[in-house]
């Protein structure tokens, strides 16, 4: 319900410290793509145009958890690139 949603949003916002607006947008997009693939697993295997019911796609906390594993926030990217430069 509404309380569960508020708790989730609060937890998610705590995990997004250091994320800029573009990072948050990328995170939301990635989470939506995980939900889309879960609802329509055939989407990448078909060359036909599929009629999608967007209202049937539910983005869950699990989708955001998966997305957080793939999105590197800008604040961490600069640290990663600097540490890679030192290795060279």
Image (cartoon, rainbow, N blue to C red):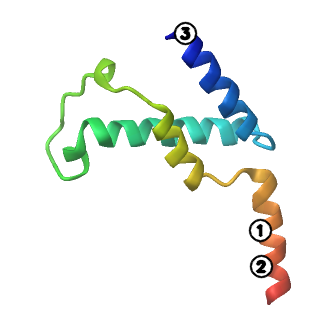
Of residue 7 and residue 65, the one placed in the foreground of this image is 7
State the image coordinates of residue 78 (x, y, percent, origin top left): 81, 62
State the image coordinates of residue 49 (x, y, percent, origin top left): 18, 37
Instruction: Tell me: residue 34, above or below residue 52.
Output: below
Q: Which residue bears the numbered disc 3?
A: 2
Of residue 5 and residue 42, the one placed in the foreground of this image is 5
Instruction: Tell me: residue 19, above or below residue 3.
Output: below
Residue 84, which numbered label?
A: 2
**Left/right of residue 65 with respect to residue 84 in the rendered view:** left
The image quadrant where one finds the C terminus is: bottom right
Label 1 SS: helix
State the image coordinates of residue 18 (x, y, percent, origin top left): 81, 44
Q: Which residue bears the numbered disc 1?
A: 80
Q: Are marks 2 and 1 in contact (CB under 8 Å)?
A: yes
Q: Quadrant of residue 76?
A: bottom right
Q: Residues within 10 Å of mark 1 (few under 14, many from 20)?
A: few
Distance from disc 3 to disc 1, alpha carbons, whole Å, reads: 38 Å
Label 2 SS: helix
Residue drawn 75% across and 35% down? 14
Distance from disc 2 to disc 3, alpha carbons, whole Å, reads: 44 Å
State the image coordinates of residue 73 (x, y, percent, origin top left): 72, 50
Residue drawn 73% across and 35% down? 21
């Amino acid at each position: 319900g509404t309380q569960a949603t508020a708790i989730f949003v609060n937890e998610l916002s705590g995990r997004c410290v250091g994320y800029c607006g573009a990072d948050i947008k990328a995170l939301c997009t990635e989470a939506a793509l995980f939900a889309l693939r879960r609802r329509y697993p055939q989407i990448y295997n078909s060359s036909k145009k599929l009629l999608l019911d967007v209202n049937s796609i539910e983005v869950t906390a699990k989708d955001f958890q998966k997305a957080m594993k793939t999105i590197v926030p800008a604040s961490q990217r600069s640290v990663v690139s600097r540490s890679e430069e030192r290795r060279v």
